[in-house]
Image: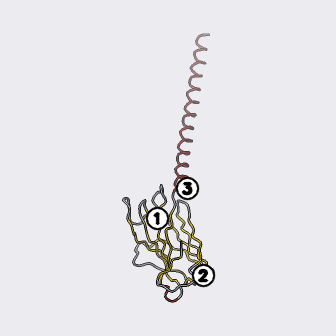
Amino acid sequence: MGMGTLIIFIAMIIVAAIAASVLVSTTTSLQNTALQTGSATQDEVGTALNIIEVYGEDGTTGQLDNVTAIVSLSAGSEPIRLNDLLVSLALSNNSEDYGFAENASNVSADEFGVNYSIEGANNRQGFLSTGDVARLSFQSPRGIQESEQVRISFIPKVGTPRTVETLSPNLILDQRSKIFP
């Protein structure tokens, strides 16, 4: 009787060890998944642009042909890679999407150029980092008329999209006219 009890006891210990190993492995896997999900959620919710000002230029003809948005990152935001940022301009009967132009001096009709007004301590070319204030410039698909509905969306690959929806100025006479705020 002693040998059979010993075999059953050893078998129970082996089964318990296997069960414990499975539980530890499952717990570790769930913890890693939860950490990854939490990190992705924090990046998605915590990363956002501040739109400081939007203005149009070339207004001496009564319409605005070029648009510039002055932007920075919200507090606590992770850097935004400008190649991963889509800018969309919608007018009453026309719209255009813009991607990042690596060369700010040679911007095509469907790209936006970037000039840093202020470079933060962690500034890197091609990124918008904490402390940076940048001017995103692009061409309107057609001249923006007086009192026209203008909608500009800034859509990062990771982070919260921002949209500015406003009317253009009632009277456009100057070279530069403020659109927002």
Q: Is residue 181 above or below residue 15?
A: below
Q: Residues within 10 Å of mark 3 (few under 14, many from 20)?
A: few
SS state under label 3 = helix
Q: Residues within 10 Å of mark 1 (few under 14, many from 20)?
A: many
Q: 33 and 170: which one is in front?
A: 170
Q: Which residue is mark 2?
A: 147
Image point (57%, 41%), residue name: 30
Three-letter residue code for mark 2: Ser
Percent across and percent down for residue 23 are 57, 34
Image point (50%, 76%), residue name: 55
Q: 94 and 92: which one is in front?
A: 92
SS state under label 1 = strand
Figure colour scheme: secondary structure
Which residue lies most toward the bottom here? 61
Image point (58%, 82%), residue name: 170
Q: Earlier in the sequence, mark 1 or mark 3?
A: 3
When asked about the image quadrant of residue 102, the answer is bottom left
Mark in the foreground, 3 or 2: 2
Three-letter residue code for mark 3: Val
Alpha carbon distance from label 1 to label 3:
16 Å
Q: Which residue is mark 3?
A: 45
Percent across and percent down for residue 105 are 39, 78
Three-letter residue code for mark 1: Ser
Alpha carbon distance from label 3 to label 2:
34 Å
Q: Earlier in the sequence, mark 2 or mark 1?
A: 1
SS state under label 2 = loop
Alpha carbon distance from label 2 to label 1:
27 Å
Q: Which residue is mark 1?
A: 72
